Image (cartoon, rainbow, N blue to C red):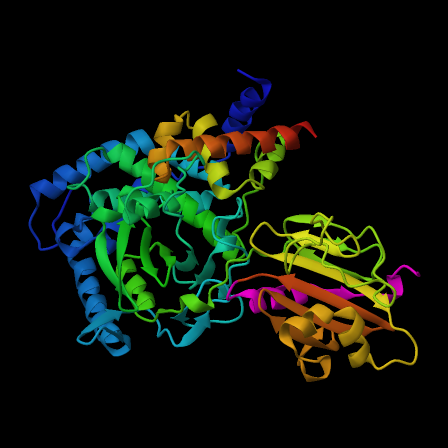
Amino acid sequence: MMATVGVMGGPDPATDERVAQLDALYRVEYVGMVRLAYTLLRSNAEAEEIVQDSFVEVYRRWREIEKPGAYLRCTVVSRCRSALQRRKMRPPPPVDEPRVSAPSDELWDVLARLSDDQRIAVVLRYYGGFSAQDIAGMLETPASTVRSHLRRGLATLRKELDA
Amino acid sequence: MSRLTDRLERDLRDIAAGADPSPSAWESILTRLDEEVEPEVALVPGLASVRPKRLAWLAVAAAVLVVIAGSIAVFMRVGDDESISTDFPDLTTTFVSPRNGYSVNYFARGEGTVTPAGQLWGTGQQGDVGFDVVETGLAAVFKGTSTEPSHPDLCFDSASAPTPCGSMDERIDLDVSDGGCGVPRSQQEEITIDEQSGRVAECPNHIEATVLFGGRLYLFTLSHDRSDARSVFDAFVATIDLTPATAVDFPGLTKTFVSPTYGYSFGYIGGLTPAKERWDPDNQPVEDVACRTGPPPAGRTCTFDPRFDAVETGRGAYLEGASTPIPDGISIDGWVDQYATPRAVGACGVPRSQQAKITIDGHSGRIAQCQDEIDATVVAGGRLYLFTLYRSSHDARKMLDAWIATINLTPETAAVP
């Protein structure tokens, strides 16, 4: 059973309940979120750090948010987007040694040449299975822009993978 | 489903399978909650027995942090009466944007801290290339850019389709189509930037502010992973000076043209028309076939001057270049005035000997700036080079300098007449 202690000493039922809800969210979403972040970043350490930070963020804002799962996904995607932006400004962390087959290595190389938003849109669409409208919500971007990212990203992938 | 999307789904699943989620992640999250979340909600399930000891340590650490924070806190002036406190380092080094018409302070932590914009904001799909980017190395990236706001009668949506123009806020919402954190500008919080009233929006890991001044729309953003991000953003904003008169609206010259005829290369953007005839000012009458200075001569139509390599930038600028061997036994300045750049003398009335000096690819030359036209001449390897910019804008000289900086003179490669 989970023990919960308020910092001022006594148990806090409200906090206890919130942790239980976060735990439930964790059991449902954690592995999937790490895999999603890893697919964008290909760094297990970075992916885990981002997802764990995102759970902390969800906990902080628990009272304000209506859909913790959706908020968690938005936060993870937003932080991955920031991580990709930061990589342009400094040497990226080493990507993990591939544990996958050669064809996916080739795909990874091509994905890395897409713009950040194109890459995110493609991964969310074809790995996450999200609609353009869902992705638009996560990227805080019009759906038409997401569709444009997808169209351009797929065009590049088709050209590069066929070459 | 296409072969491509089939493969995408399969390979992305393979990549995702390479992730290795830690089995102790939940404990890590709880520890972070204990350490990072505000005290009244801190908790350590399963660690209750160590709570008193941990609390004591946290209390000592918190006290030490308070002392340290108090001693290093940065107090920056905002307006007349307010000050902002943040544990961010002093922003003491000034970055003057070469393109976007503002300056901002940052703290220098070595080379590469600031990457100036290399292109117009909104030009193509170049990511951050339209932004000046300040990488702090402290989980915060500050960016700034500016542009002329969309024309009040020409508005387009994010898919570039014509759309009715609304209020200035609505037009800015269109200009910053991916921004605003989803909040229309008219509903955003107010912010003051260099004494101008603007708007600011905050969303997870991102803050952005827009302000209109001097006919320009400025956008400043902070991408971050900090709990004090707004204070950091405000600290940057407090140092901003808006100088719209220094902004430039010409694009980066990203393509390179190597002249097969005249012995030079230069950067350009837009449409290029290489010279089709040889420039021979000694034996050719001065004729404004391009109608740059007036209507076409009787019986003629306007055309590119076929003797010049010409660039139509599509951004209100027209570039020309050519070179020619210098005859023996002449005075360079007098010969240039009489034959090579009579337009410059005519328009500006400044003989070459009295023109301002300029350096082109290491060679000293002269420059004559007239209304809507700048002529630069330089001698290298026995050839006279003439580069002309036609542009009626306050940033014409800056654009010429940007163009000149891309020029390489290679007289040894010029075609022999």
Query: Left or right of B343: which side holds A30?
Result: left
Q: Which is more toward the observer, B253 or A104?
A: B253
Q: Residue B258 location, x and y as percent?
A: 78, 55
A161 vs B297: above or below: above
Q: Residue at the location (56% across, 52% down)?
A: B315
Is residue A2 in view from this perspective?
Answer: no
Q: Which is more toward the observer, B52 or A87?
A: A87
- Count of residue discs: 0
Query: Left or right of A163: which side holds A120?
Result: left
Q: Which is more toward the observer, A68 or B143?
A: B143
Numbered range of the magenta stretch: B393-417
Is residue A14 in view from this perspective?
Answer: yes
B32 vs B375: above or below: above
Q: Is B396 included in the stretch rendered in magenta?
A: yes
Q: Residue at the location (41% across, 59% down)?
A: B144
Q: Quadrant of the C terminus of chain A?
A: top right
Query: Left or right of A51: which side holds B85?
Result: left
Q: Quadrant of the N terminus of chain A?
A: top left
Q: Is A20 included in the stretch rendered in magenta?
A: no
Residue lying at the far bottom in this picture: please name it: B354
A62 vs B99: above or below: above
Q: Residue at the location (57% across, 32% down)?
A: A100
B240 vs B120: above or below: below
Q: Residue B411 location, x and y as percent?
A: 85, 67
Q: Residue A120 location, x and y as percent?
A: 46, 37
Q: Residue B211 location, x and y as percent?
A: 32, 58
Q: Which image quadrant is residue B199 in?
A: bottom left
